[in-house]
Structure formats: structure tokens, C-alpha cells
Image: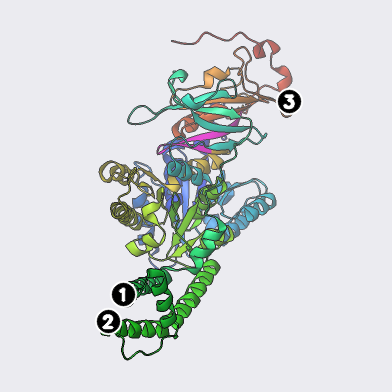
């Protein structure tokens, strides 16, 4: 918004400096988002644990792939007041701490607050309790969790496109996504058409809202999910005691006794019932020597006596082994019996833990796999009573231990793309081999991967037949960038690999939007207004009026793509020369709506 000199206003984001602290995937994508989408100047504080600060700085800049405008990079072994001051925190509009070390993020935020009491802070934290405390302590501070933002997209990809995504607005309104064909017009209100998914690539926020088959509706409650099918308690208890080795031993013993009964019935000329009685007596040590008995009967008696000597200690040992294994499996949270129609989730880091909790909350049975006993999600899974397999998921035996051949989906969420792809291919082979052995029929294994590179993910889906792939940083970064720009991103909605942001934007005093109409804000493929919050406490208008102009006390709730939100934000920036509210002409607020342009 230009001022009276014709120059951009100091409140214009293009004139402001932003600081990003961190060196991971979220930091790289956040810097690229700020530079490419919002066109702002960015300084990166790059933590380093080595002496090769210059080379690490060059590597970070090379990985950004930001054309034409590289950010300034400051490297340091740890965040200090001197380093943050050198990065320009005192004059920055916003500072983001998005490193993987949560303690370092909180410490850096406190240092930044001491240097600049009014700077906007954005923190990346996994722990929600810690996040609430930090946000309350630091004032103008947004605390976001990348895994919490991205988890619903992975859950939707795991369960299929028909699975609804729920989002609750700050006022308490509950919205959900749905396929238009499954919407009951008498029971819910369609708020907005999200996308037309009939083509090879989904067309988001189409101008013809009736063409959108994926819609956003106002829900009046969250349906209860059917509880997962569980085997009867008696069968589960028997499965714990009678392990596979014990079942084989008992089956072998029964086969020997049956053969001996048939043989005695033949040699002595008695019926099978009497022969079985004699066989059991001989096995239990009740046989008496008969020198005149035929050779066949003598051999059978000796075999039965030997079997009886070995039977009791063998069965006792196997029962004890089964009980010990079962108790250890229960204590460790491992598999304690056969399972089917479940989700195998590999990787129990931040995002894996969130997805695990989401799947469990909607009644989906999950078997968790991680190579580290100390992974964050192992304790969470065991606390929820979910089985955990500790092992290398790229090995077929680990996947078989998680019952991949009978699962409904394989979700691989480690932080290494190569490991994820290797696990997915190994899991698909194990699934197909298990189906072949059991002569089972059904759909192919649904595989969902976490992949960082978008191009690699698209080629993987197209060539290798992987169902879905998502990037945590790609899903989460738009919310971090919008928070740095001072806008509240309520939630995100994943449509394929694209992300729609649900944001609440104030109409700035004297901004371009003041005096215009809601339908003037809509940009097909970029921005769509879904609701209007007025200055009256708690009032939200869902049926948008066409003859009411926007005023500075209004707040818009919009659905937007990343580019659409970036283009909309400058239109909401208040003007330093805005007229006082009392001087705004009342007729301007009730002016007739202009005709839509062709």
C-alpha cells in the first residue's frame, strides 16, 4: 500500500526483514516460501556443530533453489544474543525458530524477545503443553507443530479419498470435507467447493463451484466410528498360551498316538476305542512286558513308552516358553496374535506419532514399527495398547512380524527418503507373497510414503505405482509462513499433494479491501471467502451478503492456496492515512453491489 510519497508503506511486507533460524527441511522450504511467494528479504541463522561454517552456508544456499534472490546467511555454533543481533532481530518484522531442537527453539525465542520486545515470534514445537505455556509467556508468539499440521493429510491418504478431514474454527464451528455425492442436502450445508478431482490433477477452488466434487460442509457433530473388530477374549488367551511350537508338538504327538492306536487295533484284533485306551496307558507308563506279543506290537509299545517319557517334559517346557513369551510380548507391546485389516505404520518420530494417534482416535487398528526402542512414538503406542515391532522395516521378517500380508495399508514415515522407498517396495513384495501363499484375493496393498522432494514423489507414484506420497515440510510450511506474515492460519486441507490454507484475515483500516464486497475477494484457483466475522462478539455470517461492504472491524475466513494467500495479504494491509472510523461515510457501507465483471 503506497503512502503519500508514492513509496511502499513501512507496513508493506516487501519493506520488512524476516529472520529464520534452523537448518532442516522446514527451514529451507520456509525461506523459499517467504522469498518466492511473499517477496520479502530473509536472513537465515544457520546453526553449525563444525568448523566448516562457510561450506555449510554455501550448501544451504544451494539447496534452497531460490531463483534470482538468495537470502543472507549467518552461521553460528549456537544461538546467542550477539548472533541474533547480527541477523537483524531488533529490526525484523518476525523471527521463526524452526530447528529440530525444541529446547534451542525456546531458548532462541526468549533471547529474541529480550532483544526485540515487539517482534513477532513463530516457534516449531511438538509438545502442545509446552507450546501453550511458551505462547502465553512470550506474548506475540505463534507456536506451531509441523507434524500436527501434516498428520491429517497422511491419515486421509491412508484411509482413502472418501475419508473426511475435520477442522474446528476458533468460534467452535465444525467443518469437514466430503464428496458431493455423499452429502445429504437436508442434513448439512455446503460451504464451498474445494476441488474438481475428476482430472489427472485436482483443480482447486474452481470458478464453477457446482463442478467441484470435493466440498467443504458445515457439520453438526462428528460421527462415531465403529470400534475395531477384536477376537473374543477366550481366543486371544488361548492364542497367547498355545504358541506355534507348542501347537506343532501337540500335533506331532497326536499323530504318533493315532498311528499307534491303529497298529494295536490291527495286531490285537480290538476296536479303535480299546486300542486308543491301551495306547494311552502305554504312553503314560502303564505298559507291561509281554514276551509272547507279536514283533509289531512290541515295537509299538516301545515307541509309546519312549514317547511318554519325552512327552510330559516337552509339553511342560513349551507351555512355560509360551507363557514367558506371551508375558514379554504383552509387557513390550508386541504382537500377541494374528491380526488383519490393520495399518502398519513404520517410523515413530514426530509425524509418525501424530498419525498413530489420529488413526487410533478414529478406531483404526495400528501395528507400529521402528528400529529404535527409544523412538518418541514407541511409548505412545504402548500407552494406547497398540502392538509395537522393534526392528529394521526394510527386512522382510520385520514386515512379516507386523502382519503386512494381511494389512489394509502400509504407511512409511521415517525421515529418510531412500529408507522409505526401500521399505515400501519390500512391504509390497511381502504382501504379494503372503497373498499368493494363502491364495487370497483382494486389492493391491495401499502404500503411503513420506518423501521430501516433490518431483521424486510424483515420479515414484507414476512409475512405481505408489498410491500416495506426502512431504511434512511442504504441508506445514505455508502455515509457518502465514504466521510470520501476521496472519492466523486456522488449519490446512490436503488435496492430493496440494495444500489449501484456512486463514482468518482482518480487513485493515484503509486497506484495499475496505469498502469492497466478499465476492470481490474471490479468485478462482487462489482464494475463496467462506465466512465473515463481524465486529459483534461471536457473530459469524456463513451466507455471505452481496450488498454489505467490508469494514475495518470485519475478519474474513478464507480458503486459499499458498500463492493466493500471498497475493491477498497486501490487500489487507492497513493504510497509515486511513480515515478515522467515525468519518467513514455510512452510505459507503451500504452501497449497492457492483455488477460482476465479465
- Judging by the rendered image, the residue that carries numbered circle 1 is 263
Look at the numbered disc 3 and give the secondary structure of its residue. Answer: loop
Front-most of 578 and 345?
345
Task: Kindly check if marks 1 and 3 are in contact, taking CB atoms under 8 A apart as contact.
Answer: no
CB within 8 Å, label 2 to label 1: yes
Residue, disc 3: 536
Q: Secondary structure at mark 2?
A: helix
Q: Disc 2 or 1, which lies upstream in sequence? A: 1
Q: On the picture, is 293 further left or further right than 39? A: left
Mark whose residue sits in front, 2 or 3 = 2
In the image, residue 17 lies at what x, y percent?
51, 44
Q: Which residues are magenta?
A: 492-506
- Structural distance between the alpha carbons of marks 2 and 3: 100 Å
* Residue 530 in the image, given as x and y percentages of width and height: 56, 25
Mark 3 Cα shell of 10 Å, populated few (<14), some (14-19), many (≥20)? few
The percent position of residue 353, horizontal first and vertical second, equals 51, 55
Q: In the image, 22: left or right of 249?
A: right
Residue 22 vs 194, above or below: the answer is below
Q: Which residue is found at the position 32% from the left and 31% from the top?
A: 200
Circle 1 or circle 3, nearest the eye: 1
Labelled disc at residue 296 = 2
Q: Nearer the viewer, residue 218 or 577?
A: 218
Compared to residue 339, the image places residue 150 above or below, namely above
Measuring from the top left, give residue 337's x and y in whole percent. 47, 61
Mark 1: secondary structure: helix
Measured Cα–Cα span from mark 2 to mark 1: 8 Å
Q: Is residue 539 within the magenta segment?
A: no
Q: Which quadrant is the N terminus positioned in? A: top right
Query: How far apart are the two marked residues, 1 and 3, measured between alpha carbons?
Result: 94 Å
Amino acid at each position: 500500500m503506497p503512502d503519500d510519497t508514492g513509496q511502499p508503506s513501512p507496513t508493506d511486507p516487501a519493506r520488512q526483514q524476516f529472520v529464520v533460524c534452523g537448518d532442516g527441511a522446514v527451514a529451507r522450504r520456509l525461506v523459499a516460501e517467504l522469498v518466492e511467494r511473499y517477496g520479502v528479504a530473509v536472513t537465515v541463522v544457520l546453526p553449525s556443530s563444525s568448523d566448516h561454517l562457510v561450506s555449510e552456508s554455501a550448501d544451504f544456499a544451494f539447496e534452497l533453489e531460490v531463483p534470482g534472490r538468495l537470502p543472507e546467511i549467518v552461521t553460528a555454533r549456537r544461538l546467542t544474543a550477539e548472533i541474533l543481533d547480527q541477523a537483524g532481530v531488533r529490526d525484523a518484522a518476525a523471527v521463526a525458530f524452526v530447528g529440530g531442537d525444541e529446547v534451542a527453539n525456546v531458548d532462541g525465542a526468549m533471547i529474541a524477545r529480550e532483544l526485540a520486545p515487539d517482534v513477532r515470534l513463530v516457534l516449531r514445537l511438538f509438545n502442545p503443553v509446552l507450546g501453550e505455556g511458551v505462547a502465553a509467556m512470550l506474548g506475540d508468539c505463534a507456536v506451531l507443530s509441523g507434524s500436527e499440521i501434516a498428520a491429517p493429510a497422511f491419515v486421509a491418504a491412508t484411509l482413502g479419498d472418501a475419508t473426511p478431514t475435520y477442522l474446528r474454527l476458533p468460534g467452535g464451528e465444525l467443518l469437514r470435507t466430503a464428496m458431493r455425492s455423499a452429502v445429504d442436502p437436508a442434513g448439512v450445508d455446503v460451504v464451498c467447493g474445494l476441488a474438481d478431482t475428476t482430472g489427472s490433477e485436482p483443480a482447486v477452488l474452481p470458478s464453477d463451484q457446482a463442478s467441484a466434487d470435493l466440498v467443504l460442509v458445515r457439520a453438526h457433530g462428528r460421527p462415531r466410528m465403529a470400534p475395531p473388530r477384536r477376537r473374543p477374549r477366550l481366543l486371544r488367551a488361548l492364542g497367547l498360551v498355545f504358541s506355534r511350537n507348542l501347537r506343532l508338538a501337540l500335533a506331532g504327538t497326536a499323530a504318533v498316538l493315532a498311528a499307534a492306536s491303529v497298529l494295536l487295533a490291527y495286531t490285537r484284533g480290538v476296536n479303535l476305542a480299546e486300542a486308543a485306551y491301551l495306547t494311552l496307558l502305554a504312553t503314560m507308563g502303564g505298559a507291561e512286558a509281554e514276551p509272547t506279543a507279536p514283533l509289531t506290537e512290541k515295537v509299538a509299545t516301545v515307541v509309546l513308552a519312549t514317547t511318554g517319557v519325552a512327552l510330559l517334559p516337552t509339553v511342560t517346557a513349551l507351555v512355560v516358553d509360551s507363557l514367558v513369551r506371551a508375558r514379554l510380548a504383552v509387557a513390550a507391546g508386541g504382537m500377541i496374535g494374528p491380526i488383519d485389516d490393520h495399518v502398519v505404520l513404520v517410523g515413530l518420530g514426530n509425524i509418525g506419532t501424530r498419525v498413530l494417534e489420529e488413526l487410533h482416535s478414529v478406531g483404526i487398528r495400528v501395528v507400529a514399527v521402528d528400529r529404535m526402542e527409544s523412538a518418541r512414538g514407541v511409548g505412545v503406542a504402548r500407552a494406547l495398547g497398540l502392538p509395537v515391532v522393534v526392528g529394521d522395516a526394510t527386512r522382510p521378517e520385520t514386515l512379516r512380524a507386523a502382519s503386512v500380508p494381511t494389512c489394509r495399508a502400509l504407511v512409511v514415515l521415517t525421515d529418510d527418503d531412500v529408507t522409505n522407498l526401500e521399505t515400501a517396495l519390500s512391504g509390497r513384495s511381502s504382501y504379494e507373497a503372503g497373498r499368493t501363499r494363502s491364495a487370497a484375493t483382494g486389492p493391491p496393498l495401499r502404500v503411503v510414503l513420506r518423501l521430501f522432494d516433490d518431483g521424486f514423489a510424483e515420479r515414484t507414484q507414476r512409475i512405481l505405482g505408489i498410491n500416495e506420497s506426502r512431504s511434512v515440510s511442504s504441508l506445514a510450511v505455508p502455515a509457518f509462513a502465514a504466521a510470520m506474515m501476521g496472519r492466523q492460519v486456522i488449519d490446512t486441507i490436503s488435496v492430493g499433494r496440494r495444500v489449501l490454507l484456512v486463514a482468518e484475515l482482518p480487513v485493515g483500516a484503509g486497506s484495499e479491501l475496505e469498502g469492497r464486497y466478499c465476492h470481490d475477494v474471490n479468485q478462482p484457483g487462489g482464494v475463496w471467502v467462506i465466512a465473515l466475522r463481524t465486529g459483534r462478539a461471536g457473530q459469524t455470517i456463513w451466507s455471505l451478503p452481496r450488498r454489505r461492504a467490508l469494514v475495518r472491524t470485519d475478519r474474513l475466513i478464507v480458503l486459499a492456496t499458498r500463492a493466493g494467500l500471498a497475493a491477498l495479504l497486501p490487500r489487507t494491509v492497513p493504510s497509515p492515512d486511513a480515515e478515522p472510523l467515525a468519518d467513514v461515510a455510512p452510505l459507503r457501507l451500504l452501497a449497492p453491489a457492483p455488477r460482476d465483471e465479465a
